[in-house]
Image (cartoon, grey):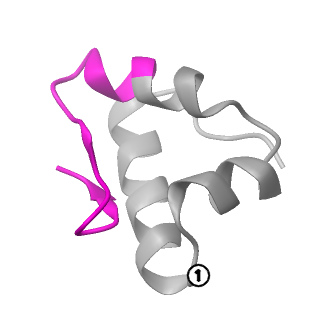
Amino acid sequence: MDLPKDPFTLLSFINTKLRDGDYDLEEFCYEYDISISEVEEKLQAIGYKYDKKLNKFA
């Protein structure tokens, strides 16, 4: 499955999967075959950072 290219759509997609899919970021990235650093870079570019305690980008 291709992940959304638009960073805001990607943010929504990932946060939904983290919330509903019982994933943490590492598991999500493994499942979708993408590096954690790539996800973090894309979402940091729009002002979001992963919060491990909340298990979401905020």
Q: Quadrant of residue 28?
A: bottom right
Q: Quadrant of residue 46?
A: top left
- Residue 54 picture location, percent across and down: 23, 69
Foreground of the two, 16 or 52 = 52
Q: Is 56 left or right of 42, judged from the image as shown?
A: left
Foreground of the two, 30 or 42 = 30
Residue at 58% across, 73% down:
23
Q: Is 44 left or right of 41, judged from the image as shown?
A: left
Provide the residue designation for mark 1.
21
Residue 36, compared with residue 24, is above or below; it is: above
Please identify the residue farthest to the front as the structure is shown.
53
Say how many tags the image has: 1
Assign a secondary structure to mark 1: loop
- Residue 57 picture location, percent across and down: 28, 50
Residue at 68% across, 61% down:
27
Residue 47 is one of the magenta-drawn residues: yes
Which stretch is magenta?
A: 41-58
Q: Is 48 left or right of 24, judged from the image as shown?
A: left
Residue 16, compared with residue 6, is above or below; it is: below
Tag 1: Cα neighbours inside 10 Å, few (<14), some, or many (≥20)?
few
Question: Given the image, on which type of amino acid does mark 1 rest?
Answer: Gly
- Residue 8 picture location, percent across and down: 32, 37
Residue 52 is one of the magenta-drawn residues: yes
Residue at 41% across, 78% down:
19
- Residue 31 picture location, percent across and down: 80, 58
